[in-house]
């Protein structure tokens, strides 16, 4: 079964994080730890037979143990199968060969699934390193400056380096995620970010890691984007203990291969961790939705207020336009008083007479208005004549009509009472405004 949780890679789980080499030209002088383990081709050749022997021993313990040499070996084989399915215990199968340790990473463990996580988008040049602190978000934000200063001391206290916090986010189990990056300033005044791989290599040193643990840091990871070659290699090679068929099916079922990558989930602890992360992300999304809903409600109120003000200003503009027109008319009358009628005024008079004659024409607007008025009078006359006739209404219908009219009457009574209350409130407001105006007038005098 493929679990499709889709939680982001923000949770700290050692999958999906890559560490690349330092960018060329970096002058950052962190001492990187030396590599003392076996490596190269010899290490790979030595590791392959060991894995092959481990797989052969596991298969022997599950199918054909030869520990006791009788029918009890079949019972032991079933017991080893049960332990392998559960992912815990030790499988004895031969007196001369050490037992096999069953872990949840073994291929026969049944408590495995595949989910999806977001592919990291930050580059190594961005310098982001993620720190998980065993503190609540409120405590981290209140002590952010002290944490930055302490982290600067852990990094050597170099005055050319400055610690910057990119973001703070809540994690499950009262933990907090802090994304930091380091900026290095050169003597010539230029500055650049320290690559995340260089910073991560430094903080992973045992002595530095111990100092970070004293500050409450429990996990340190990077979130560098995969190169096409790394992504191809990751998808082609199933993780340890994951059935290749399930891995191929997970790649086929990927809802968004451009943004999501399949991630193995081994054991109930990993499933619970991803479930907590999903719940945490859901809470954050709900909080953001509530904030957006509040903003939308506030904007709607402002929009309604603005529309009312616009309507008020339109009415005021119309009144002012009429007043200005009246003033212009009176001014023009006083200005032209005693002068003879001019040519343009004569043209205006002719145009007005033409319009008046068109309105008074029998087939034009006035005639149509008269015809409409006569039809209205006839309708009123017919209505009065019909009112003299009597109709018999069914008792049930009459009861419904009375009930409807009673409801209408009650509604009108309630509306009248509301209007009266509003009128009293308006009078009270006017009285208060009148008193405030008098008080201001008294103060000014």
Image: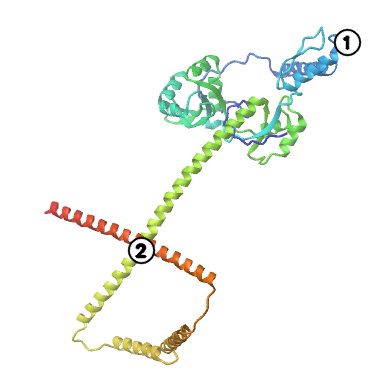
- State which quadrant residue 230 falls in: top right
Q: What is the C-alpha distance between the residues marked 2 and 1?
A: 101 Å
Q: Nearer the viewer, residue 171 or 422?
A: 422
Mark 1 secondary-structure assignment? loop
Q: Nearer the viewer, mark 2 or mark 1?
A: 2
Mark 2 secondary-structure assignment? helix
Query: Residue lying farthest left?
Result: 445
Q: Nearer the viewer, residue 103 or 222?
A: 103
- State which quadrant residue 88 falls in: top right
Nearer the N terminus, badge 2 or badge 1?
A: 1
Describe residue 110's horizontal placement relative to residue 134 as left or right: right
How crowded is the residue under tag 1: few (<14 C-alpha within 10 Å), some, or many (20+)? Answer: few
Marker disc for residue 416: 2
Residue 444 is situated, as x and y percent measured from the top left of the image, at 13, 53
Residue 25 is situated, as x and y percent measured from the top left of the image, at 54, 27
- State which quadrant residue 91 falls in: top right
Q: Is there any visible trace of residue 271 in the rendered image? A: yes
Q: Nearer the viewer, residue 416 or 13?
A: 416
Chosen colour scheme: rainbow
Query: Residue lying farthest top?
Result: 96
Q: Is residue 375 above or below residue 324?
A: below
């Amino acid at each position: 079964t493929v679990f499709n949780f889709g939680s982001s890679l923000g949770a700290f789980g050692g999958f999906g994080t890559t560490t690349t080499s330092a960018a060329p030209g970096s002058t950052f002088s962190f001492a990187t730890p030396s590599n003392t383990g076996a490596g190269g081709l010899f290490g790979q050749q030595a590791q392959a037979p060991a894995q092959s022997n481990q797989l052969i021993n596991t298969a022997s313990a599950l199918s054909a143990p030869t520990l006791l040499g009788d029918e009890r070996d079949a019972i032991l084989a079933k017991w080893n199968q049960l332990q392998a399915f559960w992912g815990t215990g030790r499988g004895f199968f031969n007196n001369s060969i050490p037992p096999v340790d069953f872990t949840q990473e073994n291929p026969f463990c049944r408590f495995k699934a595949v989910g999806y996580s977001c592919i990291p988008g930050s580059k190594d040049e961005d310098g982001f390193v993620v720190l998980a602190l065993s503190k609540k978000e409120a405590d981290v934000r209140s002590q952010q400056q002290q944490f930055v200063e302490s982290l600067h001391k852990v990094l050597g206290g170099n005055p050319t380096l400055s610690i910057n916090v990119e973001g703070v986010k809540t994690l499950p189990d009262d933990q907090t995620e802090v994304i930091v990056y380091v900026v290095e300033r050169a003597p010539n005044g230029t500055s650049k970010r320290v690559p995340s791989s260089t910073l991560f290599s430094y903080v992973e040193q045992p002595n530095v890691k111990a100092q970070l643990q004293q500050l409450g840091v429990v996990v340190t990871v990077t979130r560098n984007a995969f190169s096409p070659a790394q992504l191809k290699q990751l998808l082609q090679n199933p993780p340890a203990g994951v059935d290749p068929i399930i891995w191929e099916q997970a790649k086929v079922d990927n809802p968004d291969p451009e943004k999501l990558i399949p991630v193995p989930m081994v054991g109930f602890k990993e499933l619970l961790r991803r479930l907590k992360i999903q719940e945490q992300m859901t809470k954050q999304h709900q909080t953001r939705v509530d904030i957006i809903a509040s903003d939308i409600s506030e904007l709607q109120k402002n929009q309604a207020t603005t529309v009312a003000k616009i309507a008020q200003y339109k009415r005021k503009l119309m009144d002012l336009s009429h007043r200005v027109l009246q003033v212009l008319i009176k001014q023009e009358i006083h200005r032209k008083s005693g002068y003879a009628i001019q040519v343009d005024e004569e043209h205006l008079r002719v145009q007005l007479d033409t319009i008046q004659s068109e309105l008074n024409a029998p087939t034009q607007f006035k005639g149509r208005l008269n015809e409409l008025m006569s039809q209205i009078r006839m309708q009123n006359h017919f209505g009065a004549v019909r009112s003299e006739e009597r109709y018999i209404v069914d008792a049930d219908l009459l009861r419904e009509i009375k009930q409807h009219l009673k409801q209408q009457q009650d509604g009108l009574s309630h509306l009248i009472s509301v209007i009266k209350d509003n009128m009293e409130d308006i009078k009270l407001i006017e009285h208060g405004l009148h008193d405030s105006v008098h008080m201001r007038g008294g103060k000014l005098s």
